[in-house]
Image: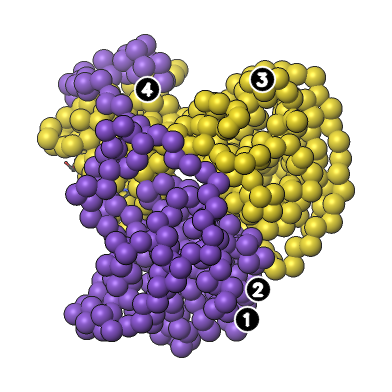
Chain colours: A purple, B yellow
Amino acid sequence: MKILVCISSVPDTTSKINFTADKSAFDKNGIQWVINPLDEFALTKAVKLQESQGATVTVINVGDTATEPVIRKALAIGANDAVRVNLDPKDSYSTAKEIAAVAQSGGYDLILCGKESIDYNGGSVPGMVAQLLNQPFVNASVGLDVNGSEATAVREIEGGKETISVKLPAVIAGQKGLVDEKDLIIPNMRGIMSARTKPLQVVEPTSSEVKVQGVSYDSVPARAAVKMVSPDNLDELVRLLHEEAKVI
Amino acid sequence: MAVFVYAENINGVYKKAAFEAVSYAKAVADQAGDTVTAISVNPTDSSDVLYKYGASNVINIKDEGLKNFSAKAFAQAVSEVAEGNTIVFPHTTDASSIAPMLAVMKNYSLITNVLEAPESLSPFQVKRRAFSGKGFMHAKAEGNGVIITVSQNAFGVKENTVSGSEEVKNLSVANEDTKVISHEQSSGKLDLKEAEVVVSAGRGMKGPENWGMIEELANVLGAATACSKPVSDIGWRPHTEHVGQTGKAISPNLYIAVGISGAIQHLAGVNSSKTIVVINNDAEAPFFKSADYGVVGDAFQIIPALTEKIKAIKG
Ligand SMILES: Cc1cc2nc3c(=O)[nH]c(=O)nc-3n(C[C@H](O)[C@H](O)[C@H](O)COP(=O)(O)OP(=O)(O)OC[C@H]3O[C@@H](n4cnc5c(N)ncnc54)[C@H](O)[C@@H]3O)c2cc1C
């Protein structure tokens, strides 16, 4: 079985998000880059399938050379090889098109993604890749088993969950629950050393059609100063919530 | 051309998110001088509830094959009936699975997590959530058609009754790639993303056995419950309740955070709540900086007392 895992390189979760002075772009100064946390669940799941079913795991990232450390980290976690499409992605559609092009020629049985990336929160790439490849798509997946040419996926639904059988090849977008948080793989020294010699293929983009542009960005406005209420005066808290904030 | 909107239902019953999406579509249609057509798959609810939010036409897709959800089959069905160049979805799990597939089918632009009415219609430009709530993006669609998903609880539900008519479309979309094996829905529980009040608790609660008081406060307020990431990682609460950068992003009217430190990753998912109350025994907890109201003290004393007081005024 061949698995393709889509990873995106995103600002570390502790990053303060700043924009350039003219607000036209995200300011990358001083940012540490990590594998999108939701993609880590997908990657770990793929590595587990590699161990249990002898699958091969390829990671793909659409990004410029700056994303290579993050790709190497994915290799250290256990992917067999990697593909980088040499394009600084501008929107979900252009990213999905490049992933689909690589997937098409690679003949993968399963494509695993994170449900959304924590930077632009598009949540669009996985579904677009599925449609571009004309494959079934399961989103918000919190469980997955593979059995021959079929997978059983559990997806989160509002107020519950649903178990689905899916014909492979398919695209599955995962989140926490796809594997347990405690099972996420932290690369060890051996992994890091071997990642250096694993193949990382760089391919040029096939097109660069962009469908959505980020015109400008705003920071989150600061809240007014907090009003502190004494724990001995909860009547006052209730009054404030009722009369001032009008939320109860 | 008319603005189309996907009115999501659960077991035939429209969700609040559907009313919000229709309200949004109506705002776009008013801006464009046009009307709203709602699309629904196998509803049992009356279309009247959609006229109430501004849909003047409702297309009810009847398709036995769509009894079970499949993103691809639903996208196919919607694409067969949606003729407008603007299609609105709520940003629910199902709708945000359908929308990207539909965008590719139609060759339209897709803008997700939309927060406000559009800034302009041609080109379509709108403010959306980005950086997990640590920033906003003004996104512009290229090309002719646009699909948007509206972030839940952002635009709000707005009554705007119009006289409407209904049309039934019998389809039989192929739905062979996926098969639902089992479906579990916990009844009577408020949906976290739709809830207007959320009571959330963190590691400060010490253990799952102490959640009774959190649930009681939530009950009295008609609220949903949530938790911080470590709480769901340790298994004190189901991961469906985990809010934050890597969990759910929510924007209720009132968010009460109990025994949660207010780490940047937690804030990312909740800081668009309209009013935030923080209860923490550590006066230095970072969450107080992002709160509207704060109480420094022991949650184990404050929560039961607060619950009694709210019960009293709710009478
Ligand atoms: C990649 C990554 C992603 C993450 N994503 C998220 C996310 O999506 N959501 C999230 O929540 N976190 C996330 N985190 C974790 C985040 O950094 C914090 O660790 C977490 O939010 C802390 O949870 P907590 O406040 O419940 O626990 P703690 O940090 O342990 O804080 C507990 C608080 O309870 C208070 N307290 C203790 N006893 C009492 C009492 N009796 N009465 C009142 N108060 C009391 C303490 O003063 C303290 O402030 C992420 C971390 C990483 C690395």
Do the residues at discs 1 and 3 belong to one chain?
no
Q: Which chain carries label 2?
A: A
Disc 3 element: helix
Locate the N terminus of chain B and report the quarter of the image it occupies. top right
Disc number lying in front (2 or 4): 2
Q: Which mark is drawn over residue B310?
A: 4
Locate the C terminus of chain B and report the quarter of the image it occupies. top left
Disc number lying in front (3 or 2): 3
Q: What residue type is labelled 2?
A: Lys
Q: Which amino acid does label 4 sit on?
A: Ile
- How far from the left and from the top, in percent, is residue B299? 23, 36
Q: In this view, does B73 lie above or below A228?
A: below
Disc 1 element: loop
Q: How far apart are marks 3 and 4 (CA)?
A: 41 Å
Q: Mark 1 points at which residue?
A: A149
Q: Are marks 3 and 4 in contact (CB under 8 Å)?
A: no
Disc number lying in front (4 or 1): 1
Q: What residue type is labelled 1?
A: Ser
Extreme-top residue of the structure = A243
Decide: few, some or many residues near mark 3? Use Cα within 10 Å; few <14, some 14-19, many ≥20.
some
What residue is shown at x 63% (from left), y 70% (from top)? A166
Q: How far apart are marks 1 and 3 (CA)?
A: 49 Å
Do the residues at discs 3 and 4 belong to one chain?
yes
Q: Do the residues labelled 1 and 2 touch (CB within 8 Å)?
A: yes
Q: Name the residue under label 2.
A: A167
- How far from the left and from the top, in percent, is residue A116? 45, 53
Decide: few, some or many residues near mark 4? Use Cα within 10 Å; few <14, some 14-19, many ≥20.
many
Decide: few, some or many residues near mark 2? Use Cα within 10 Å; few <14, some 14-19, many ≥20.
many
Location of residue A70 (image quadrant) = bottom left
Q: Name the residue under label 3.
A: B30
In-front residue for pair A113/B242? A113
Disc 4 element: helix
